[in-house]
Image (cartoon, grey):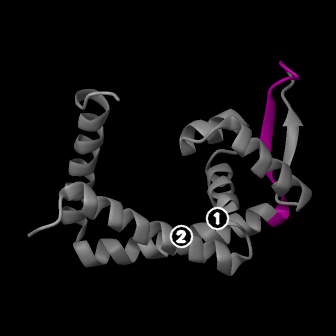
């Protein structure tokens, strides 16, 4: 009997997540750093709230991660000129170097997947997954 679709998706996601964790381990950082580093590389000046919303985790969790990353020299905080309560986050030189290393590995892995699937099949899969995500958010009953 074939496995249900969502089981296949879950297992595939777990394989990909474990692969990403290996990149963080090679770079000598926890997986939680990888997610913040790559987000800030694409979104300099983002807030902890921005990261939490993107990762779908609690702001308190991001706060703890950022505090650790700041102590270890990966990120720096800057107060917003208009609102001193709003703190912007930026990568340090060390953080940017690590983020670029991680991002490069992720892009190379993604390129290999595209080669395996073909660009057309990859786009079909992306479209199907986006439709599935929208269906889950809008159509499935909430618990």
Which image quadrant: the N terminus? bottom left
Residue 48 falls left or right of residue 132: right
Residue designated by label 2? 20
Q: Is residue 61 above or below residue 111?
A: above
Q: Magenta residues?
A: 82-94
62 to the left or right of 137: right
Q: Residue at x 82, y 59 (%)?
A: 74
Q: Residue at x 70, y 76 (%)?
A: 27
* Callout 1 touching callout 2 (CB < 8 Å): yes
Residue in the image at 58% along x and 66% along y: 103
Does the magenta portion include 9? no
Judge from the rendering whether residue 7 lies leftward or rightward of residue 69; answer left or right: left
Task: Specify the quadrant that holds the C terminus.
Answer: top left
Q: CA distance from mark 1 to mark 2?
A: 8 Å
**Can residue 45 be seen at all in this image of the molecule?**
no
Q: In terms of depth relative to the viewer, which is nearer, 129 or 105?
A: 129
Of the two numbered discs 1 and 2 on the same chain, state the one appearing first in sequence.
2
Q: Position of residue 31 (x, y in %)?
A: 64, 64
Coordinates of residue 44 in the picture (x, y in percent): 71, 45
**Secondary structure under badge 1?**
helix
From the viewer's perspective, tell me whether residue 114 is left or right of residue 31. left
Q: Residues within 10 Å of mark 1 (few under 14, many from 20)?
A: some
Q: Position of residue 51 (x, y in %)?
A: 64, 42
Quick check: 77 above or below 125?
A: above
The residue indicated by pointer 1 is 31
Mark 2 secondary-structure assignment:
helix
Q: Is residue 36 visible?
A: yes
């Amino acid at each position: 009997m074939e496995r249900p679709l969502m089981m296949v998706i879950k297992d595939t996601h777990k394989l990909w997540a474990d692969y990403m964790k290996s990149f963080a381990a090679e770079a000598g950082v926890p997986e939680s750093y990888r997610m913040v580093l790559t987000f800030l590389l694409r979104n300099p000046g983002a807030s902890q709230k921005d990261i939490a919303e993107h990762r779908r985790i609690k702001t308190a969790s991001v706060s703890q991660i950022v505090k650790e990353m700041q102590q270890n020299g990966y990120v720096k905080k800057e107060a917003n000129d208009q609102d001193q309560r709003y703190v912007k986050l930026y990568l340090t030189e060390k953080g940017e170097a690590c983020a670029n290393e991680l991002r490069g590995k992720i892009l190379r892995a993604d390129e290999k997947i595209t080669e395996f699937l073909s660009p057309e099949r990859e786009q079909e899969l992306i479209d199907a997954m986006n439709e599935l995500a929208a269906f889950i958010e809008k159509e499935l009953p909430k618990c």
